[in-house]
Amino acid sequence: MKQPRLTAPEINTNYGWLNTDSSYSLKDFRGKFVLLDFWTFGCINCQHILPDLKQLEEEYAEELVVVGVHSAKFKGEKLNKTIRKAILKFGITHPVVNDADFKVWENYAVKAWPTVVLIDPEGKVVGRKAGEGVYKAVKPYMEELTAEFKGRIDRTPIRFQLEKQKETKGFLRFPSKLIKDGNGYIYLSDSGHNRILKLNEAGKVIEEIGAGKEGDQDGSFTKATFYEPHGLALKGDLLYIADTKNNKIRLANLTTKEVTTIAGDGKLSYYSGDKQWDTPVNPNSPWDLLIEGDQMYIANAGNHQILRMDLNTNEVYRFAGSGREALQDGTLREAAFNQPSGLTKKENTLYVADPEASAIRAIALDKKEVNTLVGQGLFSFGDQDGKVENVLLQHAVGVQEQDGILYIADTYNGKIKKLDLEQKRVSTLVAGLDEPNDILFIGNTLWISDTNNHQIVQVDLDTNEKSVLVVGE
């Protein structure tokens, strides 16, 4: 991480600051250490280092200022309003500057997300690190440098007016994945409230699973805690939950009303290449779940893989994906994914929403092969319908099959699109949403988790009329 001490380039931009009511220059932080975090909010690795940043902020509350430099990958990530929603979603408590034109990124010669840069109290760059493991890399330098700058550190607290202080509270907060049972009830991951809701078709809450606060505690439905849960799957009276930011699979027994952890130790686990294909592994930011018989497929977003869980033993194994982030087809072990986040199945094909490549992938379960239906690469994205070879999506997170049609949550385009598997064409069904995450069919009505609008949108497929479902107790 260490490098020669050069004067740090300025970080102010033409696009302004968020999570604060003021604009700053590096001179405003003179006398303190500054840790710049170059990130883009859709990147799972950028999300992974947020606990490290929080820990450093807490341990060095007087000496250190963390500043997020949001250098967006996707067009949909460049707007202040979308960055603001991400700040709220992830609970970020430090200021963020919008580097939409990559000027700060270029001035610091950054090459990858995430990258952190440490600046000393005299405004000199003392080190940088790309990738995860930020706390372990930065902590020794902070110990050494706080001793070096003893007596020259300004320990006056700096208070920032955070976005959460201006947030309007609603019943739902960043609702995510949806599933239905055989009795007409719907289960919804209310991810921003760290709970699962059981609804009837009128939107009335029948039951809440989780205490509604961030945590990692097993126990009764009223005491158990989650950390940004997403994917859900049902088998009888057992509800499986992808507890995404806890890196675990949790099990809610709908009869005993108890939540237990059945996979994952809470740590970020990585497996790549030929390692550990036939031995149990741990999930890494699991984002969606799908049950087929006694197996459950897991969209393992944090390690760019599809995992499978043996529901008889609750052991998790690698199923598809080398662990490399790339748009590569081939055998299950050769293929590579890009933060897979949505799953659906038709006959012998498992379909995957692969958002960092803005792609839809198909896994032929009988042939054990992966192919790309839509998508051209990690940096090929847009909003273009038509023949699949010309289609461009933007960070599509959800996918649902119905009658030979794949319904796609084209998340950063704010749309639901239809991929006709026979005609191999894509068209837009619904527009005007804000980062939709999932789709569910209830009869002839399409339910959509309109995530950043904190609501469930319903679309009558006969009339194409759109309405908002009132969800509450």
Image (spheres, rainbow, N blue to C red):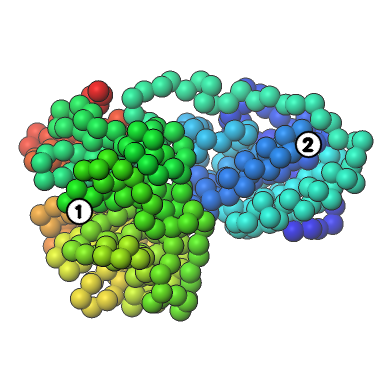
Report whether residue 380 is seen.
no
Amino acid at circle 1: Lys
Question: Quadrant location of the N terminus?
Answer: bottom right
Marks 2 and 1 sit apart, C-alpha to C-alpha, by 51 Å
In the figure, 294 relative to 386: above or below? below
Nearest to the observer: residue 434 or residue 151: 151
Q: Nearer the viewer, residue 214 or 455?
A: 214
Using the image, determine if residue 189 lies above or below residue 286. above
Tell me where residue 110 sits by quadrant. Answer: bottom right
Quadrant that contains the C terminus? top left
Residue 54 in view, yes or no: yes
The amino acid at mark 2 is Glu
Q: In the rendered image, which residue does mark 1 sit on?
A: 235
Res. 178 image quadrant: top left
> SS for tag 1?
strand
Residue visible at 18% across and 63% down in the picture: 293
Between 348 and 233, the residue placed more toward the observer is 233
Q: Name the residue under label 2.
A: 63
Q: Measured from the top left, where is residue 203 in percent x and y?
A: 20, 28
